[in-house]
Image (cartoon, rainbow, N blue to C red):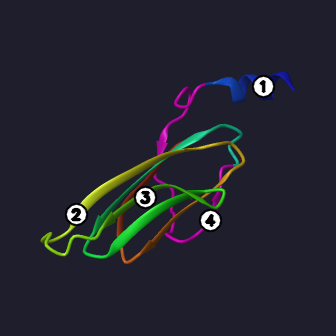
Amino acid sequence: TVANLATAAKPVGAGQTWQNPSRALNTTYTNDTGRPIMVNITGAFTVNQYIDILIDGSVIVAKAQWDSLASGRQWGTLSVIVPAGSTYQASSTGVNTLAWAELR
């Protein structure tokens, strides 16, 4: 419909707000908003830990700490745009997710 085309044509951020949905690592979610959304995930890493963000099953962005000389935790934020209708997931081993925000 014309209304659906007008909604889909809006740029990311137009009429959208930041939200903090309850999300879990290693769980697949679907962007059912009818528009692209932005996802930001912040985590704390120690040696040999990683976090990947997958869209439709493919790794789009990745963050890892492999340096055994680094002391303490390393903080990182990953951001992706998830197309309308796509699935998305943050995959990780051992990373503490500190924040998950979505512009939707």
Q: Of marks 4 and 3, which one's residue comes earlier in the chain?
A: 4
As measured in the structure, the alpha-carbon distance from the residue carrying label 4 to the one carrying label 2 is: 25 Å
Which of discs 4 and 3 lies nearer the camera? The answer is 3
Instruction: Locate residue 29, reporting x and y percent.
Output: 63, 60
SS label for mark 2: strand
Which label number is shown at residue 62?
A: 3
Q: Quadrant of residue 27?
A: bottom right
Q: Quadrant of residue 42?
A: bottom left
Count neighbours of disc 4 (C-alpha within 10 A) and say few if under 14, some if 14 to 19, many if 20 or more. Answer: some
Which of discs 4 and 2 lies nearer the camera? The answer is 2
Q: Of marks 1 and 4, which one's residue comes earlier in the chain?
A: 1
Left or right: residue 58 compared with residue 40:
right
Q: Which quarter of the rendered picture does the N terminus lie within?
A: top right
Count neighbours of disc 3 (C-alpha within 10 A) and say few if under 14, some if 14 to 19, many if 20 or more. Answer: some
Q: Which residue is mark 4?
A: 28
Instruction: Locate residue 99, reporting x and y percent.
Output: 37, 58
Instruction: Locate residue 103, reporting x and y percent.
Output: 50, 41
Count neighbours of disc 2 (C-alpha within 10 A) and say few if under 14, some if 14 to 19, many if 20 or more. Answer: few
Which of discs 3 and 2 lies nearer the camera? The answer is 3
The amino acid pointed to by label 4 is: Thr
Left or right: residue 47 compared with residue 3:
left
Nearest the camera: 100 or 94?
Answer: 94
The amino acid pointed to by label 2 is: Gln
Count neighbours of disc 1 (C-alpha within 10 A) and say few if under 14, some if 14 to 19, many if 20 or more. Answer: few
SS label for mark 3: strand
Marks 1 & 4, CB-CB < 8 Å contact? no
Q: Which residues are magenta?
A: 11-31
> Measuring 43% from the left and 58% from the top, which residue is drawn there?
62
Which label number is shown at residue 5?
A: 1
As measured in the structure, the alpha-carbon distance from the residue carrying label 1 to the one carrying label 3 is: 33 Å
